[in-house]
Image (cartoon, grey):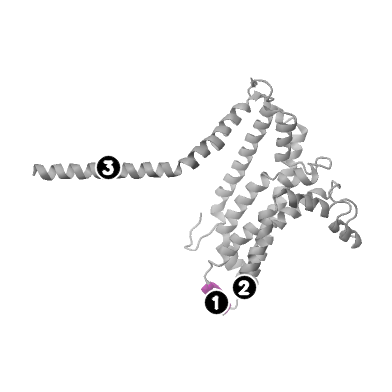
Amino acid sequence: MAKKKMSDTSRLKLESHRKGSDHLAGYLSISPWLIGFILLIVGPMIASFYLSFTDYNLLSSPNWVGLDNYRALFSDGRFLKSLEITFKFVFISVPAKLIFALAVAMLFNTGRKGSSLFSAIYYIPSIIGGSVAIAVVWKQLFGRQGAITQILSMLNIAEGNLIGNPDTALLVLIILVIWQFGSPMIIFLAGLRQIPKELYEAASVDGATKVKQFFHITLPMLTPVIFFNLVMQTINGFMTFTQSYLITGGGPLDETLFYAVYLYETAFEYLRMGYASAMAWVLLMIIAVITLIFFMTSKYWVFYQDGGRY
């Protein structure tokens, strides 16, 4: 009996030692990511939060000013303008981009030969669209002597420098973002292919038209995918920087002064690091609130195949 108890104890110790070894191996495996996460994300976030309560210009030590930076934001005309422009950009570009992406995904969901190749080709703009080279090309296309400008002028649709016109500059950037529809399109395509074909067959037997099938089958079944794309594209929209900074420089008359562009100017051109840190945290709070609203309202319109809701 004593030997049996000893053997049981030894077995438990051995199992505990093996579990400890497995845990150690797991922690060692994720340690590069964990170290990078702490040094490159958590650390800078803590530093930024502290600096948001200081007056700091990179050349001298931070001077604690409390909530002065946050109070100053809402009396800053350019800050309010950048907020207005960014909201306008997001609320126009995100729905338009998702509608266009869904339309293209439905075209590729027909199962015709070569659809996979074309879907891969249409994804390319999403990969290169945020690059400096594409921004420069877009600036040339919509500039005073650009090809798109010349074509629109010949058709009497628009004349002059579209980028330099306060009424059309933001529209040019919105078109560029919509052109980068590949990422949500691929996700929509994956969602469409998960919808059971039996639902469409049953609807056809009942005499439902393609339009009714779209609104009563396709859209309800795609709501989880729509929800995911909506959240991700909204977050990306609020952080848009390259297009405005390189194509319009925030102009003309600050009509394309995106929030991220003004934050960059404040930090690296005016060296107001404390003020810029406060802007960064306000942006984080805005994105968090909007995302929370999406999650809270999703229970009314996001459905799953099992009949449940989010």
Rendered-image quadrant of the N terminus? top left
Q: Is residue 251 left or right of residue 121?
A: right
Marks 3 and 1, how far apart at CA: 56 Å
Q: Position of residue 210 (x, y in %)?
A: 64, 73
Residue that carries the numbered disc 1 in the rendered image: 201
Which residue range is magenta in the image?
197-204
Marks 2 and 3, how far apart at CA: 55 Å
Q: Main secondary structure of the magenta part?
A: helix
Judging from the image, what secondary structure is the residue with disc 3 in?
Answer: helix
Q: Amino acid at mark 1?
A: Glu
Is residue 201 visible from the viewing direction of this image? Answer: yes
Quadrant of res 55: top right
Judging from the image, what secondary structure is the residue with disc 1 in?
Answer: helix
Q: Is residue 64 magenta?
A: no
Q: Nearer the viewer, mark 2 or mark 1?
A: 2
Q: Nearer the viewer, mark 2 or mark 3?
A: 3
Q: Amino acid at mark 2?
A: Thr
Quadrant of res 112: bottom right
Residue that carries the numbered disc 2 in the rendered image: 110
Few, some or many C-alpha atoms within 10 Å of disc 2 (few <14, some 14-19, many ≥20)?
A: few
Marks 2 and 1, how far apart at CA: 15 Å
Residue that carries the numbered disc 3 in the rendered image: 16
